Image (cartoon, helix red, strand yellow):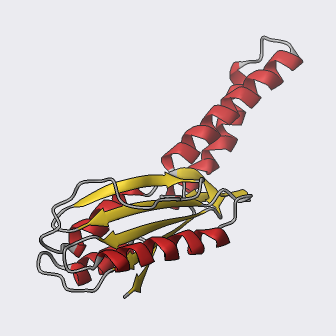
Amino acid sequence: MSGYSFDLTRAGFLVLLIAVAPVLWWARSSLSGIGRGRMAAAIALRSLALILIVLALSGMRILRENERLCVIFVVDASDSIPPEHRQLALDQIREAQKRRDEARGDLVGLVIFGRDAGVEIVPRPAAIDLRDFATLIQPEATNIQDAIQLAVTAFPEDAGGRRLVLFTDGNQNIGQAFEEVRSARSLGITVDVVP
């Protein structure tokens, strides 16, 4: 479900709406030679134009509220993770995504990483049903920071709730994961870790 709300980024400009009254007075005196109907229409259009200009100056925005959730699973596929643990992560992902709300349009995506990161599945409403990873990465190191950065950029802009679920042993040897987690949280993204 989605609703709409309004927001003003520079509300101080609303004081200019006081100018509507003098414009109406001026418009009435300058349009004295035309009929009543045309005069009313002209005054209404001038007032509407002035109001729209003031609202634009005040930074009025229409916000669409969206309850749709997007979950991106981020899986460590480095050499420090045994193949059976990677398979267990895929099994847990398949099980976890069964709880998504298809009617609401919840999305799921998958990022894998080692030294570098790659998007295995872009966020989509369809279920993830992988048996193994197809994206080629360099598995000789673990860079959680790059994986989180890539996952954050993979979120669609219209997702209401955003969540990262990180599957890793935490043996990072490249990058600064904690700083990247703080950065993601500052963007309103929930970060969960599955050891």
Q: Nearer the viewer, residue 43 or 180?
A: 180
In the image, 15: left or right of 116?
A: right
Q: Percent position (x, y) of residue 98?
A: 64, 69
Number of numbered discs overlaid on the protein picture:
0
- One can see residue 153 in this view: yes
Q: Residue at x 63, y 32 (%)?
A: 49
In the image, 174: left or right of 60?
A: left
In the image, 194: left or right of 83?
A: right
Q: Nearer the viewer, residue 163 or 81?
A: 81
In the image, 16: left or right of 33?
A: left
Q: Residue furthest right?
A: 36
Q: Residue at x 23, y 79 (%)?
A: 177
Q: Residue furthest front?
A: 84
In which image quadrant can residue 150 be found? bottom left
Q: Nearer the viewer, residue 160 or 175?
A: 175
Q: Residue at x 52, y 59 (%)?
A: 128
Quarter that holds the N terminus: bottom right
Q: Percent position (x, y) of residue 12?
A: 50, 60
Q: Residue at x 59, y 69 (%)?
A: 97
Quarter that holds the C terminus: bottom left
Q: Nearer the viewer, residue 132 or 118?
A: 132
Q: Percent position (x, y) of residue 135?
A: 30, 53
Is residue 6 depicted above or below 113 in this figure?
Answer: above
Q: Percent position (x, y) of residue 164?
A: 43, 72
- One can see residue 157 in this view: no
In which image quadrant can residue 111 be found? bottom left
